[in-house]
């Protein structure tokens, strides 16, 4: 059954728990608070992540290998902070395993996401698309922001699922066809990671622009979602909920590499074709979309 046609509906497709809070925490909190239907699909449990807290090191893949189930709880806690109730794992929790960083042996495991047949994984997402009927899809660019195989695969699966969901001939048992009106890719404008952004970095590592995923020239930014105090705080709390992976200190955060970077409280998006209407970026992902 279709959702009400006048309620904005947003679908986000991410690779691992924590990617959504880092990239889209402000956006998700804002739209959820405004009554939009927000659906998150996470493609793996993030089993290959490096564990930051020493007291949780036993969860790591080279020890107890229990990080994936633990991160399910972290994701649930993060979604409570953002006010998002509809969060799912592609094909169910653990259907696809985290593939590890590019070029590692984990890429070759038959159960990892990187090895999943594209149309098989896309069909699982088609079912969600046809059920939730989003107006807008948010995912990564073709490089996944920084070349991680699961991010690249999430982009490919989301893109293919959008095509297949609109095709009446594809798997009619998965629901009525649905065409997503607009797709955006996550991005960070170059101006948001200038020297001033790192000036108060409390972490010891020296970070530069090349360490930040998804940085693009400002002219490619099509939409800017401003956080404000309320949604910026929700984002920081959601990121902190992913405690095995993220340390948040004030306006900065670090992953396991210890390289500090600013928490982006204004979240930016670009269109796949690189276009942008004249004038400043839009302030709403649904601008010009018929609801």
Image (cartoon, rainbow, N blue to C red):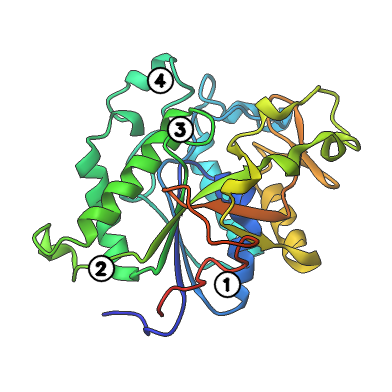
Vertical relation: 188 (above or below) 230: above
Please tell me which residue lies in front, 107 or 162.
162
Between 231 and 287, the one nearer to me in the picture: 287
Work out whether mark 2 precedes mark 3 in sequence or the reverse, and give the earlier one.
3
Write down the residue under mark 2. 178
Give the spatial CA distance, label 4 vs label 1: 36 Å
**Which residue is most to the left?**
169
In the picture of the structure, the residue carrying the numbered disc 4 is 106
* Upstream in sequence: badge 3 or badge 4: 4
Look at the numbered discs 2 and 3 and tell me whether their residues touch, using CB distance below 8 Å.
no
Q: Can I make out residue 289 in this image? A: yes
Residue at x 63%, y 56% (from the top left corner): 25
SS assignment at label 3? loop
Q: Residue 143 shows which numbered tag? A: 3
- The residues tagged by marks 2 and 3 sit, at their Cα atoms, a distance apart of 26 Å
- The quadrant of the rendering that contains the N terminus is bottom left
């Amino acid at each position: 059954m279709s959702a009400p046609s006048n309620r904005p509906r947003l679908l986000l497709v991410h690779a691992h728990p924590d990617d959504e809070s880092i990239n889209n925490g402000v956006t998700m909190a804002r739209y959820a608070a405004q009554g939009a239907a927000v659906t998150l699909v996470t493609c793996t449990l993030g089993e290959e992540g490096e564990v930051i807290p020493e007291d949780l090191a036993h969860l790591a893949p080279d020890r107890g290998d229990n990080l994936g189930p633990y991160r399910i709880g972290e994701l649930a806690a993060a979604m409570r902070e953002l006010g998002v109730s509809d969060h799912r794992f592609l094909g169910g929790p653990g259907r696809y395993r985290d593939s590890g960083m590019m070029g590692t042996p984990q890429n070759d495991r038959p159960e990892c996401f990187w090895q999943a047949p594209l149309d098989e994984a896309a069909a699982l997402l088609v079912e969600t698309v046809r059920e939730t009927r989003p107006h807008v899809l948010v995912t990564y660019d073709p490089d996944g922001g920084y070349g991680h195989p699961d991010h690249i695969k999430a982009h490919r699966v989301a893109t293919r699922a959008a095509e297949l969901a609109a095709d009446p001939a594809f798997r009619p048992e998965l629901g009525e066809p649905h065409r997503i009106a607009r797709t955006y890719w996550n991005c960070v404008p170059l101006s948001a990671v200038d020297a001033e952004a790192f000036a108060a970095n409390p972490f010891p590592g020296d970070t530069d622009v090349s360490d930040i995923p998804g940085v693009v020239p400002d002219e490619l930014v099509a939409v800017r979602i401003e956080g404000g105090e309320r949604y910026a705080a929700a984002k920081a709390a959601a990121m902190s909920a992913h405690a095995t992976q993220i340390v948040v200190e004030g306006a900065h955060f670090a992953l396991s590499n210890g390289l500090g970077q600013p928490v982006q409280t204004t979240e930016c998006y670009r269109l796949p074709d690189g276009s942008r209407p004249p004038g400043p970026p839009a302030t709403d992902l649904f601008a010009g979309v018929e609801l």
